[in-house]
Every structure is written in structure tokens, then in C-alpha cells.
Amino acid sequence: MFDKILIANRGEIACRVIDTCRRMGVTTVAVFSDADRAARHVQMADQAVHLGGPAPADSYLRGDAIIAAAITTGAQAIHPGYGFLSENPDFVDQVQAAGLVFIGPSGDAIRAMGLKDAAKALMEKAGVPVVPGYHGADQDADHLARMADEVGYPVLIKAVAGGGGKGMRRVDDPADFAQALDFARSEARTAFGNPDVLIEKYVLQPRHIEVQVFGDGRRAVHLFERDCSLQRRHQKVIEEAPAPGMTAEMRQAMGDAAVRAAEAIGYSGAGTIEFIVDGSDGLRPDRFWFMEMNTRLQVEHPVTEAITGIDLVEWQLRVASGEDLPVRQDDLTINGHAFEARLYAEDVPAGFLPATGRLAHLGFPASARIETGVRQGDVISPWYDPMIAKVVTWGQTRAVALRSLESALVDTDVAGSVTNLDFLIALTRHDGFRAGQVDTGLIGRDLDALTAPGDADGPSVALAVIGLAGLADPDTQGGMTLWQPLRRTIAWDGGHAVLEVLGPGHARVTLDDSTHDVRRQGDRWWVDGDLCRQRIAHHDAGVSVFGRGTVHLKPVDPLDRAGADDGGDGLTRSPMPGLVKAIHVTQGQQVRAGDRLCVLEAMKMEHSLLAIRDGTVAEVLAAQGDQVEAGAALIRLDEVPE
């Protein structure tokens, strides 16, 4: 076993690897960028080495600097985590050439599976079923359009070097193919440095089921399946294991195919074989097809660990250090059910745009397994994936595990950045999802209901008012009264309430449309005679109440005299921090509502900013390549003269 390893990653996966290393007595070396100087993974590791600037190209993608850090600190091996250099075969070769061990598959194995078209050909040869489509080398746009016609619409355009939903577009109509191809190629070039694509038949009622495999270079086993069908724009939202509705026959067929795939390339370490499954007639052994192999540890690996009792990171370390696979296939069994929900800093009402901000308050329940790379007070920056945490729950049955996930999410407290927390809670309460009726289109079909803003809960707002008034602390007496209650107005950004202190621990809060009697008994709150589970938190951004719909109130600064934004200045502003990827208009050009003005790149995804009305481009205020902050003015439109 290794004495010391370097972790060539950041965030929650770096922290996850450190946890296992601590248990195994392995010393760890972290690496960090300027943006991560005080990050959680840096604080957890035994040593830490600075790599460079905040951009991944200046830090976490600098293979030479990472290898030098490993050699300087005396590390014997490098764990890549996922993302960044984890599936870069040239980096693997460089690590091994430096006399170090790469904790993962060989460079040749990664190359074999790195390009989706070549991987599909290899899988066909190994007897693994593949999705009908075109995987050839001819990338001429007209040729690809003809191939799409032959495959039959709808089709899916996918980057051959892609993953994570990047460089991927569904096309339902031949008339939309050319534009979708341009988008997919552009995004693929940005994310992977390779614009090539393949064309696949789009399965109309698809499920995304993947199989966890593990090999030692000679033989492989599978650790059963995960269902990752709950997706939005090809990004996984909630994963579970095992897959609902899975039959023994189907599991055997998928597991055997996954093992054949891994053994065909002499695979070593943890990997995932992803399948697309036609769920229109239940789960049948003749209705699944190979999509791709992820030659690394997956984000959702904790659900597999939860149902098998296996620490996959420990297995990675053991196999990379020269040990054989610890078990045989017959030794592995499934125990219970597990879920993982990905908690992100993102603006759901604005279309799930990535968000930034300082986590003014952060709290997680003890009932769930929490995988996180941040702490209260940390900043979600625009440089990296905006994940806050993964919330993982287990139960003896699927229903129990899902109820545990709902409870854990309700008991999760986040303030200081907008998040997808309410969206995740809504998903756990979705009737179809509860019944196990999942496919990749579920979120899209019910998106409006899942993202509908809830009405502010009166009792929760009343408790937040108590917090703004400084009366939430149990040690606060709340003042005294003689013949009349103490009465004052409490104002916050967007509203106000009348607070009447009736005595110690007793107040009346009058909102616009309701009045609430609030009492404190010990450390518990009662509103209108009902015991409340809500939690009141003070932080730099104001006061939050968690537990029954989240309420955030930001106090009004009486000295703030900033003018209001009238919203009619004709400016198209950046909805988030990002890179201006392209400008599609010039000064003096006339545009119509819905025309594309520019493209913003953030978190490796591209977002088109469209004209909200007809007009003439008066000014172009940004240039291609500019790094802009949220709210930055990009394009100004004048009204079209009548």
C-alpha cells in the first residue's frame, strides 16, 4: 500500500478521497489554485501545493505542475478524482514516465473508450449491444445530415469526446439539424478541444441505467446498476441504486455486458458502463444499448457504496498498489436502496443558470451521508462546477430511502446563494418518481410544476421577522410592557411587517394579509398554537428560516439610497459571471425579439442571450473573450423607429 498520494483535484471528490486515505493511514497531498487557497480540501490534506491561477488551464489542468508537486512532496501515486485530467491518457503516460502510479486505468484503456465512435465499434466487437447511429470519421455537415436522415428522427448529436451533457443536442426536425450541429460542435470544442460528433437514434422513452465495474487489469466484476434517468439537459439530478423495476434477468444481461466491456480493454480500477434503455415496455434484456464508458470514479458512486458496503476509493488504492480484485462476482450482493441528490448553487427560476455567492449559512442533517467540498463562509466561484454537496440516503426499501432523502433535504440549510434545494424537494414528492416511473423526460414534462415558486409561508415569515427584530436568541428577554405592547415596523428588501412585543418570548406579527401569534417556550417556537420545526438562522445576508419552505429576509439599510433599475434601458445584461464566447450582432443592426445577440460560456456550458424585443443595436459593450461579472451590460438596443 502507498504511504503518500497526491490528489489531482478539488472540491468534494478531493475531500472524499482524503476521508478514505485517513482511514487507511495514507498521507495525502492536495493541490490548489488561487481561488482555492483556503478551500476545505486544502485544509483536510496533510500537505498542499499551489498550482497557479483560478482558471483550470492555469492550475488543475497543468499536468506537468501536478507531477512535479507529487515528486517534490514524495508522493508515490496520483489520484485524479473525476473531471479535469482524470480521463486524459497523455497525462496517465506522463505520470507513469515520471515513475509514479496513476490510480486508475491505463492510458490505452482510456484511449479505447475516450472517443465515443471508436468505443462503440470496440463494444460491437466484444458483443455489447450499441445504439443505432453513425459513428464514422466523415464530419462533413452535409454528410452528417444525410446520416441523420438514414437513422431517422429524432436523433441525438453527441460530441465524440464528450460527457456531462456538453456537446449534445436533440434534434426532432431536419430543418433544425444545421443549427444544432453548430451548437454541439462549438460546445464540444470548448469543453474537450475536439469538435467531432456522432449521430444516434434518440430513444423516445429512454432510461439511463449504468453499471459500476471494477477491474484489476486481468478480470473484472460489476457492482450492480444505478438509475440516473432523472436528468435535465442531460445533467444528472438525482441518482439511485438499484434501478426501480429491475428484473434478475435484465440485471444479469447488463452486468455480463458491462464486464465483457471492461475485460475487452484490460480495465483496471473503477469505471462505469452507461446504457440507454427503452423503458416503454418495462425493463427487457433486448432493450438496452451501450452509450459510453466513463473511465474513472463517477460522481454518483456513493449510492453503489451504500447498497454494497464497498468503499470504492479503498479498492482503487488497493488495486493500483498491485493487489488483485478483493472479491469475486458471487461475493457481491445488494442490500437495500440508496439515493443521491446533487445540491447546486443555481438559479432555478432563471433557467437553472449557475450561481455564485458566499455561503453565509450552511447546515446539513446528521441523518444523511454528505459529500461536500465547502463550508459555511466559503465562496461559490465562477471558475468551477457550482456543486455545494451531494446528499445521500439509504433505506431497506426504495420508499424508505426516498422518504429519508426528502427529510434530509428539508433539513438542509443554505443561505447566501440561490440553490436548487426546493426543486430537489419537489422531485422527491413527485408522484411518478415516488412510484418508480422514471425516464429521462420526466423533469422536462413536469418542469413548470417542479419549479413553481411556492407562496411564502405565513408562520415562517413571522419567525423571520422575529429574527430580524433580534428576538430569536433564547437569551433575549424581548423587553417589558406596561399597559400597551411595544410596537414597531420591521422592514426588509421587498416587504415589511408590524411587530408587537406582548411580553418575554411572546409577540404578534402582522403581515400584509395575516396576523400570527408567536411564542417561545425553551428552545422551541409555537406559531398560532402550533409547534414549529422551523429553524431561524442569522447570517451576513440577513435572516433565514428553514424547515417548511425556505424564507430569506434581507434587512433594509436606511442609509441606502441607490436608485431602482427601471428595467427599460434596453440593456442585455449577463445573467451570471462568465466568458463572452461570441458576439452575433454589430452596431446599427436591426434585430427582432428572440434573435441571438451573444453567447456566454459559464461552467463549461454555453448560454445564448436573446433579444427581448425588436430594436436596433445601439452599442456593443463587450467583446469576444471578455470575462464579465453577473449584471454586466453586454448589448444596448434602441427602439425601432416608427
Image: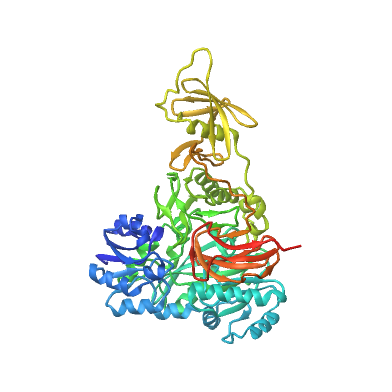
Q: How does the figure colour the protein chain or chains?
A: rainbow
Front position in the image: 332 or 436:
436
| Residue 565 drawn above or below residue 59 | above
Residue 565: give x, y in percent of width and height: 59, 49
Front position in the image: 130 or 39:
39
Residue 199: give x, y in percent of width and height: 62, 78
Residue 534: give x, y in percent of width and height: 51, 36
Quarter that holds the N terminus: bottom left
Q: Residue 627: in sight, yes or no?
A: yes
Query: Toward which corner of the image does residue 575 lie, by quadrant?
Result: bottom right
Q: Relative to 104, is 417 on the left or the right? A: right
Residue 144: give x, y in percent of width and height: 64, 83
Q: Relative to 382, is 237 on the left or the right? A: right
- Residue drawn at x 40%, y 58% is 12
Q: Residue 249: in sight, yes or no?
A: no
As drawn, which residue projects farthest toward the right?
A: 642
| Residue 421 drawn above or below residue 521 | below
Q: Relative to 374, is 405 on the left or the right? A: right
